[in-house]
Image: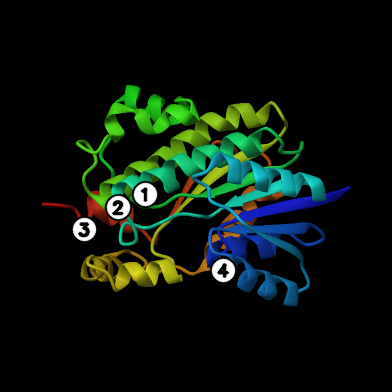
Amino acid sequence: MLDVVVVIGAGSIGQAIARRVSAGKHVVLGDLREENAQAAAKALSDAGFDVSTTKVDVSSRDSVRALVAMAGAIGQVMGVIHAAGVSPSQAAPETILKVDLYGTALVLEEFGNVIARGGSCVVIASQSGHRLPLLTPEEDKALATTPVDSLLALPMLQPDMVKDPLHAYQLSKRGNSLRVKAEAVRWGKRGARVNTISPGIIMTPLARDELSGPRGDGYRRMLAISPAGRAGTPDEVGHVGALLMGPDGAFITGSDFLMDGGVTSAYWYGELAPA
């Protein structure tokens, strides 16, 4: 039986991780835009990988289930790389919550039902989740464990509470790491692991949208003042993803890995601290 690695969101970060963990496996690439999946498939195929593509909308349970079924028909799902999402400059709060928060919870639930023993998953969250002020224990638990189809009905996520796209994004990414922490328990019963990576600004098309968007000046200042003094690269995230999904990461599950060049450190304890 073939081993399958599913990549959701065919962007630079998903591809970088896939290149490091998919040798000898079949890659299933899913993206909302078929042209993105096709372009990524060509790059991976040219590098020697066996690839199939499909369209997927992570905010639709039927669409995610179709992706699960497609992957399962090819072989056993040994890896999931969930890198799909929208940024604060790309969508309204409602869409961000539906795609980034609900969509991630849905992917974790559906693939957690089929992941093979020894399998692993990496979810791409964000440094933004680390800049959200502390939530109450009750709010943390609600984001982590509320049944997926009830998640968007939480009082803390209603339009009168979440009015700004950045706030929606921060809540979603904090919710991703909390949901993964809870899902690690369920995945562990299948002998599988799941973790999040919370990157800072990584030079991808999504990051370029942000740098040229209304918050661009702030992001450029953030990079200049950060301890690393620069943005990251997809390959740097790929190295961490490979650790988490490979045998050297076999003792790591339910964890979140912040890799932002020290931006969060500067935000809480340095020159980026809010007045």
Amino acid type, mark 3: Leu
Left or right side of 178 for 50? right
Residue 75 in view (yes/no): no
Q: Are marks 1 and 4 in contact (CB under 8 Å)?
A: no
Q: Residue furthest right?
A: 1
Q: Is label 2 in a helix, a strand or a loop?
A: loop
Residue underneath mark 3: 272
Residue at mark 3 to residue at mark 1: CA–CA distance: 25 Å
Residue 7 pos. (x, y %) = 63, 56
Instruction: Estimate the spatial distance between the alpha carbons at disc 1 and disc 2, rounded to whole Å.
Output: 6 Å
Which class describes the residues within 10 Å of circle 2: few (<14), some (14-19), or many (20+)?
some
Q: Earlier in the sequence, mark 2 or mark 4?
A: 4
Q: Which residue is mark 1?
A: 96
Instruction: Identify the amino acid type marked 4.
Output: Asn
Comparing 120 with 163, the one in front is: 163
Mark 3 and mark 4 in contact? Answer it, CB < 8 Å.
no
Residues tagged 1 and 2 counted as in contact (Cβ below 8 A) = yes
Q: Dot 3 lies on which element?
A: loop
- Residue in view at x 21 percent, y 71 percent: 217
Horizontal side of 15 relative to 23 (left or right) equals left
**Relative to the observer, which residue lies in front, 171 or 231?**
171
Q: Residue furthest bottom?
A: 46
Type of residue at label 1?
Answer: Ile
Instruction: Give me the residue at 27% from left, 52% from top.
Output: 166
Q: Residue at x 66, y 48 (%)?
A: 67
The disc at residue 36 is: 4
- State the residue position of label 2: 92
